[in-house]
Structure formats: C-alpha cells, structure tokens
C-alpha cells in the first residue's frame, strides 16, 4: 500500500464509520491525520480520538470550511468523506442543504486545498456512494449530490492532472456502520437488501479504508479520475 510516514492527511467526518476507519488506517501507516466532526471538541465523543488532530467543522458553513484550510495548512491527502442525507429531501430547502453538504462543500474544500496539494503532488479521494450511479428514490438530494461527486471527481482529475494532483472516488455500498443501523432493525427488510448483493453480506469500514490507502499511495500513481465501487457486487445487476 505504501508508507505514509510524514504525510499529512485530512479526513472530513473522521470520527465514526467509514471516515474513522480511513483515518485509523492512515495513522497505522505513519501519517499525521487531521479529522473533522460536528462537536466542539474531541472529548465530546464517547470514543478515543487521541490518535488524531481534531477540528470542528459544519460542512454547511462556508466560513468554517475556509478556516479549516487555514488551520490545516500543508497537506498531502484530502479525503472528502463527510456527508449524509436530510429529512424530506423533496422539500426544496432540505434538498439544497443536502446538495450543500454532499457536493458544494466537497468542491469548496478541493479548491481551498488545491495550492498545497499541487505543491505536494498530492491526491484527493472523494467518498461517493452507489448512489453516484444508482437512483435512491427517497433521497433525491443525496442522490443528486453523490452523482455530482462522480462528475466533479472526473472534471477535477482532468483539470488538475498537469499540476500533479490526482483525484479519485470510492463508491461504498451497504456498509456496516452506525449510520446504516436503521436498515437492520427489521430482519425482513435487511434480508431483502442483502438479497440484492451477490456477496450476501454487509461490507465493513476497514474494507473501504484499504481501498482509500491504495488510491492515495504511490502504487496508484497512474490512476486519476477513477470511481471504484466497493459494494459486494451490488451494481453488477
């Protein structure tokens, strides 16, 4: 996978689930890792975040996003992981809030860190979703935002390749995290969900983290603009 000793990595939404697994993987490989979360300080969480440098970040707040870029400074790898859906995304305000979190904030952070990433010949990894490719009818804002992340990844990869910045995307499927607990409350519903997955199981956050390490490493030095599904075969069908 490559050694990240001395590398500086930022993982947005790195306090739980996929983001935390990615942050931990980079730490194990020697990186200095900064994570963001919504709470005022790391001690407000009931998990140990002492391995990371923590900053509060509301992804909806443009000023806070700009402040993060100033606080973090030099950077080798940007992982745009933070995101999520909103209640009733058929309401226009909620739809716009979802687009802000899942797409606009990603673009903003990419542009904010562009100068330092170019200096470091660094990389950007955007965390999309199978919703980047498939329609999730109950969350139109989330679906549109994650679809937009796919297009954004390709556009920035094309534009910034001459600057030495690689831009790729991961598209997780059904991953076992706290955010997906509601999908497992009803055993019948869970069985139907897993019935659409050829591997017939939930993915684990560490399985996303492994791919994140690879795409951010020198082993992937000739890969940019790629979108890798990690979905147990869900999109085969």
Image: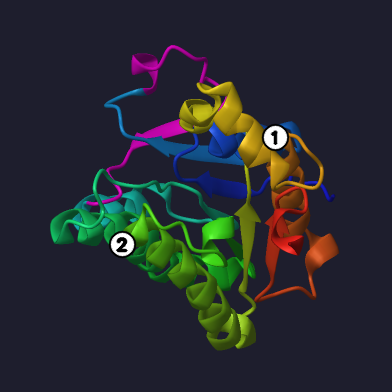
Q: Is residue 5 visible?
A: no
- Secondary structure of the residue carrying tag 2 is helix
- Which residue in the protein does label 2 denote? 99
Magenta span: 42-60
- Secondary structure of the residue carrying tag 1 is loop
Residue 107 on image: x %, y % = 39, 68
| Residues under numbered marks 1 and 2 in contact, where contact means CB atoms less than 8 Å apart | no
Mark 1 and mark 2: Cα distance apart in space: 27 Å
- Front residue of 132/162: it is 132
Q: Nearer the viewer, mark 1 or mark 2?
A: 1
- Which residue is depicted at the point 60% across and 31% down? 190
Query: In this picture, is 35 found above or below 169?
Result: above
Residue 55 on image: x %, y % = 36, 36
211 horizontally vs 2: left or right: left
Q: Based on the picture, tell me whether residue 51 belongs to the magenta stretch.
A: yes
* Most common secondary structure along the magenta stretch: loop
- Which residue is depicted at the point 56% across and 71% down? 119
Sequence-earlier tag: 1 or 2? 2
- Front residue of 35/185: it is 185
Q: Is residue 150 visible?
A: yes
Query: In this picture, is 6 found above or below 189?
Result: below
Task: Place residue 12 in its image quadrant.
Answer: top left
- Which residue in the protein does label 1 denote? 202
130 horizontally vs 135: left or right: right
Instruction: Give the number of the disc on residue 139.
Output: none
Task: Place residue 30 in its image quadrant.
Answer: top right
- Which residue is depicted at the point 51% across and 45% down? 11
> What colour scheme was applied to this rendering of the protein?
rainbow
Q: How many marks?
A: 2
- Front residue of 208/12: it is 208
- Which residue is depicted at the point 37% across and 52% down? 138
Residue 122 on image: x %, y % = 62, 65
């Amino acid at each position: 996978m490559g050694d990240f000793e001395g590398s500086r990595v930022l993982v947005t939404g790195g306090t739980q689930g996929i983001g935390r697994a990615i942050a931990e993987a980079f730490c194990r490989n020697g990186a200095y890792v900064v994570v963001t979360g919504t709470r005022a300080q790391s001690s407000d969480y009931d998990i140990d975040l002492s391995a990371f440098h923590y900053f509060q970040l509301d992804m909806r707040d443009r000023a806070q996003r700009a402040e993060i870029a100033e606080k973090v400074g030099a950077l080798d790898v940007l992982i745009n992981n933070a995101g999520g859906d909103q209640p009733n995304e058929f309401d226009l305000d909620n739809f716009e809030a979802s687009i802000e979190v899942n797409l606009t904030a990603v673009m903003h952070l990419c542009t904010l860190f562009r100068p330092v990433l170019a200096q470091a010949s660094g990389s950007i990894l955007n965390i999309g979703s199978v919703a980047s490719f498939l329609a999730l009818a109950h969350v139109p804002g989330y679906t549109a935002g994650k679809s937009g992340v796919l297009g954004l990844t390709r556009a920035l990869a094309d534009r910034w390749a001459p600057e030495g910045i690689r831009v790729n995307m991961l598209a997780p499927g059904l991953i076992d995290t706290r955010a997906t607990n509601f999908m497992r409350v009803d055993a019948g519903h869970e069985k139907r969900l897993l019935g659409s997955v050829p591997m017939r199981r939930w993915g684990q956050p560490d399985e996303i983290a492994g791919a994140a390490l690879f795409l951010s490493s020198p082993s992937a030095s000739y890969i940019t603009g790629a979108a890798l599904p990690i979905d147990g075969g869900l999109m085969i069908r």
